[in-house]
Image (cartoon, grey):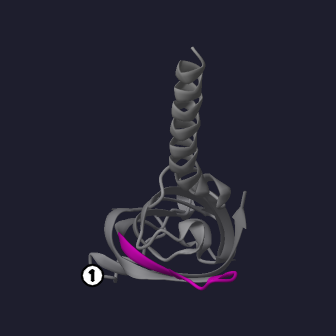
Amino acid sequence: MKKTIKVIIVLVFAFSTSLSAQISFDLNFFKKPKAAINFGYHSGGGGWAGFDLEYLPHKRIGVQGGVGILSYGLGLNYHLNKGGVRSSFIQLSYWHQGFGERHTQSLLGPTFVYRFKRFVQLQGGIGARVGTGPSFDTEISSPLAIMYSVSLYLPVK
């Protein structure tokens, strides 16, 4: 009987140690910030100024949305390394610039966002014009537009 109890105790200890080692490895992801907010020039869909909020439901996949002065934007992000919200990423972006009579254009395209380790991010890419509004300059013949922003970001836990 004592031998059986000792075997059970050893097995429970071994199992719990193995399980806790696996869980602690996976839980490291949850200790990192899973969201970031950024403010800056052309943030929030390419308006003069705005902000975005990014949330990471997975280690490398993020979803982002934001608003700016007369604009809004959405994005699906793929982070290039496991650095969480502090890492650089590739984004499929949608920018809607202007509302009503002030609607200029809507853009859809890939952008690259470089995030420095602390607080600064730069974004650049090319967007295909998927819509135009009354304020669009008809002399522009290119179906593409440059998408860029410069902003400060803050990780949020």
Packing grade of label 1 (10 A; few <14, some 14-19, many >=20) is few
Q: Pointer 1: what residue? A: 141
**Which residue is nearer to you in this view: 33 or 8?**
8
In the rendering, at what x and y percent does residue 113 appear? 48, 78
Residue with the most extreme top position = 1
In the rendered image, the quadrant that contains the N terminus is: top right
Asked whether the viewer can see residue 146, the reply is: no
Kindly state the secondary structure of the residue where label 1 is placed: loop
Q: Residue at x 53, y 71 (%)?
A: 83
Which region is colored magenta? 110-120
In the rendering, at what x and y percent does residue 116 appear? 60, 85
> Where 108 falls versus 126 (above or below)?
above
Residue with the most extreme front position = 2
In the rendered image, the quadrant that contains the C terminus is: bottom right
Q: Residue at x 72, y 60 (%)?
A: 156
Instruction: Name the residue type under label 1.
Output: Ser
Asked whether the viewer can see residue 119, the reply is: yes
Which quadrant of the structure image shows residue 80?
A: bottom left
Q: For residue 55: magenta? A: no
* Left or right: where 25 falls relative to 141: right
In the rendering, at what x and y percent does residue 118 appear? 68, 83
**Which residue is nearer to you in this view: 121 or 134?**
121
Which quadrant of the structure image shows residue 100?
A: bottom right
Which quadrant of the structure image shows residue 25?
A: bottom right
* Left or right: where 151 falls relative to 108: right
Q: For residue 111: magenta? A: yes
**Which residue is nearer to you in this view: 4 or 109?**
4
* Left or right: where 59 falls relative to 125: right
In the rendering, at what x and y percent does residue 55 appear? 58, 54
